Amino acid sequence: MSATIPLSGLIRHEIRLAWRDLVAMLTAGRPARLRRALIGIAVVAAVMHLPALAMVGKYAALASAPDKTALLVLMASIVMAAALMLSQAIESVTRAFYARADLDLMMSSPVRIADVFSIRLMTIALAVTMMALVVFAPFVDVLVVKGGSRWLAAFGVVIALGLLATAAAIVLTAALFHLFGPKRTRLVAQILAAVIGAAFIIGLQIAGIMSYGTLSRFAVLTSDAAAAAAPDPASLVWWPVRALLGDPAALLSMLAAGLLGLGATMALFSSGIGGAVARASSAATSSRQARPRRGFRPLSRHQALWWKELLLLRRDPWLVSQTLMQLLYLVPPALFLWRSFGDLSGAAVLITPVIVMAAGQLSGGLAWLTISGEDARDLVATAPLASSRVTRAKVEIVLMIIAVVFAPLVIPLALASPSQAVVAALGVALAGASATAIQLWFRVEARRSQFRRRQTASRFATFAEAFSSIGWAATAGLTSAMPAFAAVSAALTVAVLVAAWKLSPAGRS
Amino acid sequence: MRPDLALDVRGLTKRFDRLAVDHLDLAVRKGEFYALLGPNGAGKTTTLRMVAGLLPPDAGSIAVEGRDALRDPVAAKQLMAWVSDEPLIYDKLTPAEYLEFVAALWGRDAREAEASAHALLVALGLQQHRHERCEGFSKGMRQKVALAGALVHDPQLIILDEPLTGLDAVSARHVKALLQERVHAGCTVIMTTHILEVAERMADRIGVIVAGRLVAEGTLAELRSQGGSEASLEDLFVALVADSAEAA
C-alpha cells in the first residue's frame, strides 16, 4: 500500500478514467451526446430481446436435470461466451502493457507499481464482465420471464466467467511476453485474441462440415454421436451448466473459482508487469532496419502512392491483422467449398453471402487504413497533385487487395457454377465499393495507429457499413433462388447507401 | 502580380471561432529569408497553412511565384515545400524511402532525387540511419527527415513553421546552414520562429504579426528605426506586442 495515495484514491482514478473512456467510446468523443447514446443503447437492448426470444426462448422451460443433448448445447453456449470474454480480456490486458498514457507518471511516482497494476487488472475484469452482462442481458431476461427466477443465476455465471477470463488473459499475455518478447507480443496477442474469439464457432462449423456436410454449428452438438461421447450428466464437467440452471452450490463454486483465480493471478503477476511495460515501451522506441534497395526507381506520382500504401500495409502486421482476422470466418465456407466440390450447386448458394459479407467488412477496414489513416497528411496535402488523384490511388489499392483475397474463392465457384460465380464476384465488388465509399464520405483523417477509433468516430458510418455488407450479402444469397427478394434487398441496400451519403459530411457540404 | 515577389498575399482572412487572420497583406521577395514573428495565437501558422494550401482562406488572394495559388493550387504546390513544427512522416518508412516517395510525388527525376537525398541525409547527419524505419526516431530526427523531404524536390519557396523545435544545437546549426545555402542559391524561405536570435541573425526581413494583422515589417535596422532606439529584437518585439494589445 502506498504511503502517498490511498488505494481507494487509485481505484477512484482508474474508475474515472475507465468511465471517461466509455463515454468517449459511446459518444464518439462528444460528451454532449451521452443522453442520446444511452437512449440508443436502451433501444438496441430492447430490440435485442426479440432475437433473444427466438434463440433461447425454447430453452426456458428446460428441466433442472436436462438430457445430454441439452447439456451439450448449453455448455457450448457457455464456452462460446467464455471464449468471447477471453478474447476481449486478452486485448485489454495487452493494451495495458503497451499503452503509455499515464504510465510514465505512475511509474515515476512514489506509488507502489504493483498496486497500480492490480487496480488496472481489476478494472479490466470489471469492464469485461460489464460488457458481457450488457450483451447477454436480453437472453437472460427472456429466460427469466419465460422460465422463472432460477435463470437469474445466469448473471452469476457471466460474472464468474468474466473474472476467470481476465485471469486467463493475464497468464496468457505474460506467457506470450516471455515467449515472444515485447516486440512481437502485441501482434501475437492480437491474432490469438481473434482466433480464440472465433475458434469455437469455427471449430463447430468445421466439425459439422466434415461430419455432416453442413455449415450449421448445431449439427455436431445435437448429434447422437456427441451425446454418446459426452460425460455422464452427474459429472463435474457440467457444473457450469448446473450453475446456469440455478444450482446454488455450482453457482457459488464458480463465483469462488473466479474470485480466487483472479486474486491469485493478480498477486502473482502485478509486480512483474511494471518491468514488462518498461520493456514494451523501449521496444516501441527502437528502430528496425529495412532491407536497403539499390536506388530510387523512376515512379510516376500514381505509382508512388500505390507503392507507399502497399509498403505501409505490409510493414504493419499488427494493424493489418485487425482487419484480416475477419478472414478467419472464411475458413468454414472455404472448407465447405472444397468438400462439396463434386456437387457445388448447393454449396455455392450457401457460401456466396458469407464471401460477400467478408468482402464488405474487409474493405471497410482497409479503406479506413488507406483513406483516413494518413500519417503524413500535410505532405500529401501539399503535394502538387489534385486530392482526387490521391483518393483514387488509395481506393484502387483497397479494391486490388479485395480482388487478390477473394479471387481464390470466386474462381473455384466459376468452375462449377459460372452464374453463381458472377453473382459472388458482383457481390464482392458491390460490398467492397460500398464500404469504401462509406469510409470516403465519413472520412476523418487520423494516424493509422488510431485504427480503433474507426468504429467510434462515426456510429452512423459503422452501422451503414455493416448494413450495406449484410444487404449485399443477402442480395447475393437470394439472387438465384428468389430473384424478387434479391431485388428488394438490393433496393434496401441502395437506400442505406443513399441515406449514408445524405447524412455524411461529404453529402451535406 | 509583381514578378519580383515569391509570395504575394493580399487581404487574406480566416475566421474560426474568432478572427484568426485579418485582411493580411504580405509580400516576400524572391531569394529572401523572411522571418514571421508573433506571440502564440497571433495567426502565423494559420497564415502559412493557407499559403501552403492546407487551409482554405475565407477571403483574399495568394500568389506564389506569380501563380494564383487558389485558382491553380497544383501549379503553386509544385514550387513550394512545407515543414510544420510537428513532423508528420511515415513511421514504417525509412528516411531513404520517405525521400524517394516525396521526390516521386513532386515528379522529380529519380537519379537527381537520389543524389539530392544522399547529400541532404549527409548534411543532416541521417546518413547512418537512412535504412532504419522512422518509428524509433526522436522528435529531432523526425524533424530532420521532414526537412530533408521538403528540400529533396528542390522547391523555390520553402515555408517552415518553427522548424528548429526539438533540434539539438548541432542539428539546429546544420539546418540553419542548409537554409542559408538554399537562399544563396536563389530560393525563398519564410519561417516562423519563437527564437528571436535566429530571426535576428538569419532573416533579411522580419514581419511581426499580432491578432492576425501585420503590425511591423522590415529589416532589423528598419525595425529598430521604427522603434526609435538601438534596442534588441526582443525589446522591439515585446514593445510591438504590448502596443498592439493596448490598441486592441
Image (spheres, rainbow, N blue to C red):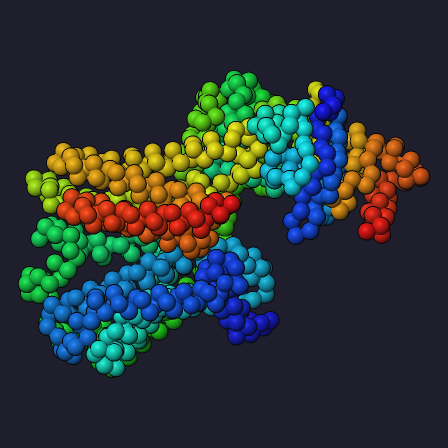
B74 vs A97, left or right, is right
Q: On the image, which quarter does residue A85 sit in?
A: bottom left
Q: Position of residue A254 (x, y in %)?
A: 28, 74
> Residue at left 26%, top 67%?
A50
A71 vs A2, left or right, is left
- Asked if B104 appears above or below A162 in the picture, the reply is above
Q: Position of residue B180 (x, y in %)?
A: 72, 26
**Camera-side residue of A391 and B239:** A391
> Residue at left 31%, top 66%?
A47
- Asked if A212 appears above or below A290 in the picture, the reply is below
Image quadrant where one finds the N terminus of chain B: top right
**Camera-side residue of B189 and A488:** A488
Inspect this view and state whether residue B56 appears: yes
**Camera-side residue of A179 and A136:** A136
Q: Position of residue B209 (x, y in %)?
A: 77, 42
> Residue at left 14%, top 47%?
A481
Q: On the image, which quarter does residue A460 sit in?
A: bottom left
- Asked if B192 appears above or below A58 in the picture, the reply is above
Inspect this view and state whether residue A276 appears: no
Figure disc tally: 0
**Camera-side residue of B85 and A51:** A51
> Residue at left 15%, top 60%?
A218
A186 vs B66, left or right, is left
A198 vs B24, left or right, is left
Q: Position of residue A250 (x, y in %)?
A: 23, 78
